[in-house]
Image (cartoon, rainbow, N blue to C red):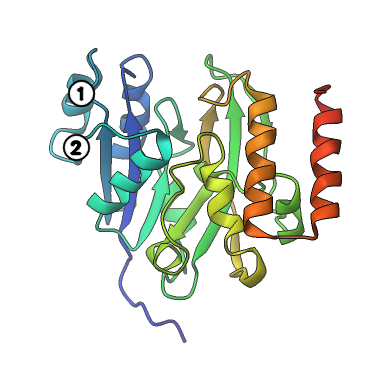
């Protein structure tokens, strides 16, 4: 029997820094969500452009704005978690948008944050011009995490209880903090509730753009740290990843 009877609150956490070009559509897509019990937590690194002005004009009183000097995205996410009140946490970046007005409502149907720690939908990866590059499936299996981040955080609700057990984002991670968060649970992995819902459009770019070699190195460090497989298997995965992208 599920233990949580009311509609759980969703905290949408949005780090920003000089994002006036893309943040409007992101906030607008949050405002129109039909799921009522939600909050927007913006963590702004003291933007020098009109990012905050845009957010305040669009969100009105529907956003909590945290001013901070985070040491990277992991730290910004952690600042957002500290300021949030939701039972579920959802992370997005400026330029990401919810697919439809009822995306969160459809994702939330029948979920319980006490039991359902990871609730996953699908995402569309898009260019900065909105062209769809690909759409993910919802056929996640744990073994996929051996070699890639198999559940993009733009399609994932994470219960606050997951963070209470496995901790916050590792601030030493620059590119793959969401991957590390999942790998911590690899040997005691909670069931993933998978929904036939396209949750969001994830815009290309970000700190990992054109940094494939560094991302692969961080992936390997994270795998080794979390001891998800024997060292020899992790080394095979590492060298195959480098070979795939033509990295020596």
Q: Mark 2 — residue?
A: 65
Determine which of the numbered discs, if any, sits on residue 52 in the image.
Answer: 1
Q: Earlier in the sequence, mark 2 or mark 1?
A: 1
Left or right: residue 105 versus residue 180 is left
In percent of the image, x 36 and y 41: which residue is there? 75
Q: Is residue 34 visible?
A: no
Name the residue nearer the viewer: 165 or 130. Answer: 165
Residue furthest out toward the bottom: 1
Q: Quadrant of residue 217?
A: top right
Left or right: residue 15 versus residue 230 is left
Picture coordinates of residue 147, whole percent (x, y)? 75, 46
Determine which of the numbered discs, if any, sits on residue 132 in the image.
Answer: none
Picture coordinates of residue 106, whole percent (x, y)? 47, 54
Q: Quadrant of the C terminus?
A: top right
Q: Residues within 10 Å of mark 2 (few under 14, many from 20)?
A: some
Picture coordinates of residue 166, whole percent (x, y)? 47, 64
Q: CA gap, disc 2 to disc 1?
A: 9 Å
Tell me if residue 104 comes above or below residue 61 in the rendering: below
Left or right: residue 240 versus residue 47 is right
Q: Residues within 10 Å of mark 1 (few under 14, many from 20)?
A: many
Q: Secondary structure at mark 2?
A: strand
Q: Quadrant of residue 44?
A: top left
In percent of the image, x 29 and y 45: which residue is there? 79
Q: Are marks 2 and 1 in contact (CB under 8 Å)?
A: yes
Q: Is residue 181 visible?
A: yes
In percent of the image, x 30 and y 45: which residue is there? 80
Q: Secondary structure at mark 1?
A: helix
Picture coordinates of residue 98, whole percent (x, y)? 44, 37
């Amino acid at each position: 029997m599920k233990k949580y009877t009311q509609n759980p609150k969703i905290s949408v956490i949005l780090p920003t820094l000089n994002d006036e070009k893309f943040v409007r559509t992101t906030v607008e897509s949050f405002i129109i969500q039909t799921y009522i019990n939600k909050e927007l937590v913006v963590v702004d690194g003291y933007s020098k452009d009109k990012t905050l002005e845009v957010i305040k004009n669009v969100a009105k009183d529907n956003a909590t704005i945290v001013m901070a000097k985070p040491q990277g995205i992991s730290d910004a996410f952690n600042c957002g978690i500290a300021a949030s009140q939701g039972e579920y946490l959802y992370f997005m970046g400026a330029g990401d948008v919810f697919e439809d007005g009822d995306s969160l409502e459809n994702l939330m149907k029948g979920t319980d944050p006490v039991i359902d720690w990871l609730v996953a939908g699908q995402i569309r990866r898009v260019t900065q011009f909105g062209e769809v590059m690909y759409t993910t499936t919802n056929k996640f299996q744990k073994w996929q995490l051996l070699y890639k981040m198999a559940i993009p955080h733009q399609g994932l609700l994470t219960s606050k209880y997951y963070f209470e057990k496995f901790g916050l984002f590792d601030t030493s991670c620059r590119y793959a903090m969401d991957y590390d968060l999942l790998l911590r649970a690899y040997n005691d992995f909670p069931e993933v509730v998978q929904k036939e819902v396209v949750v969001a459009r994830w815009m290309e770019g970000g700190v990992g753009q054109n940094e494939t070699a560094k991302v692969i190195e961080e992936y390997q460090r994270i795998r080794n740290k979390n001891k998800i497989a024997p060292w020899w298997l992790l080394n095979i995965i590492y060298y195959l990843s480098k070979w795939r992208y033509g990295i020596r």
